[in-house]
Each structure stands twice: as structure tokens, then as C-alpha cells.
Amino acid sequence: MKKYRAGIVGMGFIGAAHLEALRRLGTVDVVAVADAFQGEEKAESYGVARGYSDYREMIEKEDLDVLHICTPNVTHCEIALYAMERDVNIVCEKPMCCSVEEADKMIDMARKKGLMHGVNYHNRWYPMTAQLHEMAKRGEFGDIHAVYGEFSQDWLLYDSDYSWRIEASDAGKTRAVSDIGTHWLDLCEYITGLRVTEVCADFKILHETRKKPLGEALTFGGSKGESAYEEIRVTTEDHANLMFRLSNGALGSAVFSQIIPGRNAKLEMTVAGIKQSAVWCCDTCNEVRLGRRGEYSCLFEKNPGLMDEKVRVNAGYPGGHGEGFPDAFKNSFRAMYSAIGKVKENPEYADFETGKREVILCDRILESAQKRQWITV
């Protein structure tokens, strides 16, 4: 059995999540990590053999099979191109990059080199979201006529809450939409098999300025009441309301927000068809609520024996044993690593084409909010 050599660049919250998931696969050795802030210390704290402050040095020295990119969005393209030029497969955090031009460069390089290229839209990989995908393909909902829901958080509620994601120079032109909204949109298109064709959006910036601490600011670290800070201007949205139309004429609506008190990270989606509806929420990710007119609603709980054979691999434990966020990462990476050396078009995992699709959606949604009108995708 081949053991893949992996490296991770960026060891914040999400880099650590990648590390933990990869260790559970059994086919991957995370041989090194890189982080511009205390790379060696972070490697030691996570029990990784070597740490670097420069990802280039790690790539040159470690003979990697795969690089996981978990850094600020604006760096993704540069890092990915550098690695792919040296024949390293890529797993990239979302959003994949900050422009369509960057996405095209990444796609072209991956194709030229024949490399596996994945974007970690992990919400496809919960056992029950994968099950809904199969149910929709079989027509169990009938003609889908409406999809709606939310992805809401509260970690940027106060003007003293700060992350690099707030600054367009690091994160790109949108924030709530690109950071969490793309997760929801990818899941919507994945479950239904439909495409978003038109969008109409409205944005809100709650705090026109924020207090940026002069020390290190951790994702989801909360307001620390730092006395030493600088005021920065905010140009990206805290909250987005979205209406959209799908390729079959279905209507959709969603809220993407990082300023809803009491919402840690709630992703919820309702899919309504003429035969049946389904509600899935990450808070109760091991169950789906199904409803039909004139019948009792029911809970379909995760149980490999009742799930489609194709998606049972996503349920690592028997029914009654909960699986969640870390397991979705593991499932996503398992699918990506299994494609190394045999990449095909339109894989079940999100690839660079998916990443480009989400960049395009972000651009059209931003355009709609700026012009205050419906925009064709």
C-alpha cells in the first residue's frame, strides 16, 4: 500500500483540521508543515517531524506527493502554481482563489501536469448530504421547485472581532459570500444536480471600521479586548441576502452572515420537490427530516444499512454513532487521494473547475449587490 507524503502550508484552525483528518486515513504521512508564523514551533506542537517558515523550502526539500493549502485566499494561486510546477498534487481550501484569471491559471497547470486538484468543499461529504445527492438523482423529490436556507455565524459580530478574512487585500472582494456562502451554494448545486443561473443580492457591512489587534489574531478567537490595535476600514460584507434561480426554473433564497448572535456555524438547507421535501442542518448532521403532503414527517437517521450503497463509505461508524465536521474532511480527502494518478473530469469531490465556478458565482453576486439588480451567471 502506497503511503503518500503530504505537506500543509498554513497551520491555523483549518490547517490543524486538515492534519487531523489526514492522519485518520492511514494512507498519508504528513511529513512537514509550513507557516510564516512560528512554523517550526507549530510542527513540534502537532507532532510533525519538520516545520518551515517558507513553503518553498518545504516543497524543495520534502519530495511531497500532495500539498494542502490553508493560507489566506490571496496566496492560494501563487502557492499552488509553485507546487504544481514541481509535480505536486493540490488540495486547496476555499475559496480556491480571488479571480477567474487565477482559477484559469491553476486549472491549466493542473491539466498540463496531470495532477489531482481538489477544493475542500467538505459539506458534500457528510453521510446524509451524500445520501440526499443520490435521492435527488433518483427523482425521489420529484421536480424540485424551491431551495432555501442559511449559513450563519456570530464570530465577527463586534467591531473588535478581527480576522485576515476581513481585509480584501488578503481575502478578496467578498467575505461572507466567499468564506461561507460558497459552501452553501456548492452543497445546493451538488444535492440538487441543478445550477444557479441568476442571482439577486443585498449586502450589509455592520461595522465600517474594525479594531485590528497589533498582535496575532486567531480565527474564531473571539474578541479579546486587546488594548493595542489600529482602526481599519472594512469593504467586504458581514451579511448577504441572496435570491437566485436554478437551471430548471426553481426559486432559491439564502442568508450568509457572520454577525447573527448565537449562531456558531449553522448551515441549513431545505430542498422542496413536488413529491417530497428534505431539511438538513449541520447542527444535526446525522439526520434528515423528510416530509410529504398528507403524511407524517419522518427523520431519516444515518444508518449504513439504510443508505445507498454508493455513499455508505462516508459512514465510518454504525447507525447511532454520530459523525460530523472532522469526518466530512476525512471523506473529502479520501476521495481526492484515491484520484491521484487517475484524475477524471467531474469527480464526486470538488475540483478546480468547481472552485472556478464558485469564484464566478461570487463575482456575479457582488455585481448584483453593487448594481441592485438581477444578474445572469
Image: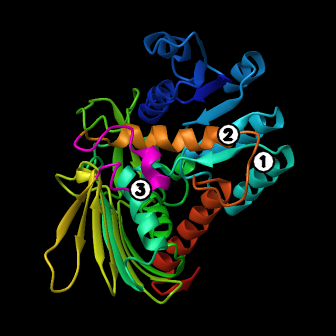
Q: Residues within 10 Å of mark 3 (few under 14, many from 20)?
A: many
The kind of residue tagged 3 is: Ile
| Distance between mark 2 and mark 1 Cα atoms | 9 Å
Kindly identify the amino acid type of the residue bearing the numbered disc 2.
Ile
**Does the magenta stretch mainly form a helix, a strand or a loop?**
loop
Q: Is 229 or 260 nearer to us in this picture?
A: 260
Side of 318 relative to 77 (left or right): left
Does 182 sit above or below residue 227? below
Magenta stretch in the rendered image: 302-320
Magenta includes 318?
yes
Q: Which residue is mark 2?
A: 90
Q: Is residue 346 magenta?
A: no
- Real-space CA distance between mark 3 and mark 1, rounded to the nearest whole angstrom: 25 Å
**Tag of residue 180:** 3
Dot 1, how many residues are within 10 Å of its Cα: few (below 14), some (14-19), or many (20+)? many
Above or below, 367 relative to 329: below
